[in-house]
Amino acid sequence: MKCQRCGKTAVIYQKYSNAHLCKSHFIEDVERKIKRDIRKFKMVERNDRIAVALSGGKDSIALLYILHKIFDKRQDLELSAITIDEGISGYREKTLSHAIKLTGELGIPHTIRSFEYAFGTTLDKLTEKKEAAACTLCGVLRKNILNKAARELGATKLAIGHNLDDEAQTILMNYLRGDVDRMTRISGAFQPRMVLRIKPLRSVPEKEVALYGFLNNLPVSTDECPYAGEALRNEIREMLNNYEVKHPGTKYSLLGGFEAVSQALRPPGMQIVQCEKCGEPSSETVCKTCRLLGR
């Protein structure tokens, strides 16, 4: 098929927009969506110090590359990267090498933290105890270290590589659970001692992020975490993907609908306290990290 904009050979057909795009126009389209959301949600402001959560997977690799491409000439902005090594044998080593490779090529400061360093254990060891699902443990502990590391680096924003699929899945999961509290957190309300999180890839479908990385020769990995099969998110992902095939644009509709109600979901003031065990911000006297670790 031919690109509808220039007549060159198309590399993708976007069913939701009914458009065939060549390599250059596809890359332009991805970057246009990201720039639009950055402006719309004021994700990047003057004198920001942006820390990028860099796992080494396709999403975070593409995110760091794009932010560097867009803002490299801005003298008032600083970019850095933070990688968390959870201790997943046979998996994290590969993505860690990709993260080190890209930050070296782009000349971006790179901080690596591990569960072993922060908590004295690894995810593999924690899962052996069967006290909580691997994805629950990983999500809570990663967020704890990322926020702490970003704060120590003096970051004003923490960029996360969540794509459209991730956002749509999270929104639907919270709807199905009736979890209004979690919905308010997605909306990005400011919380004391929490570095504000931004999601520049939120409007880019997962498959397009992967294709973007491939076309730009980025060191991306499409390997799936060995613990991913345990997550409820997998069922939601499959359901949404099936629905998207029959009804193109479903994921964008979920995201747009959530944006429309997100202001009403924000509470007048969420009570944030310091965890009495570790001192990190929490909505309870003992944070979830400490509870999961049995502190």
Image: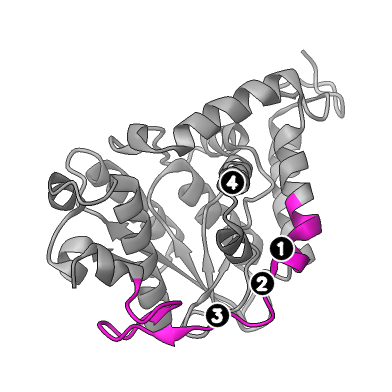
Residue reaching furthest to the front: 178
The amino acid type found where label 2 is placed reads Val
Front residue of 59/6: it is 59
Q: Mark 3 sits on what residue?
A: 191
The amino acid type found where label 1 is placed reads Ile
Q: Mark 2 sits on what residue?
A: 44
Tag 2 and tag 1, C-beta contact below 8 Å:
yes
Q: Position of residue 125 (x, y in %)?
A: 12, 50
Q: Secondary structure at mark 3?
A: loop
**Which secondary structure type mostly characterizes the magenta part of the structure?**
loop
Q: Position of residue 80 (x, y in %)?
A: 45, 70
Q: Mark 1 sits on what residue?
A: 38
Residues under labels 2 and 1: Cα distance? 6 Å
First of labels 2, 4 by sequence position: 2
The amino acid type found where label 3 is placed reads Gln
Per the rendering, the mark at residue 163 is 4
Front residue of 117/76: it is 117
Residue reaching furthest to the top: 1
The amino acid type found where label 4 is placed reads Asn
Please provide the residue range marked out in magenta.
258-287
Front residue of 293/101: it is 293
Q: Quadrant of residue 143?
A: bottom left
First of labels 1, 3 by sequence position: 1
Q: Residue at x 27, y 82 (%)?
A: 278
Q: Position of residue 101 (x, y in %)?
A: 34, 51
Q: Secondary structure at mark 1?
A: helix
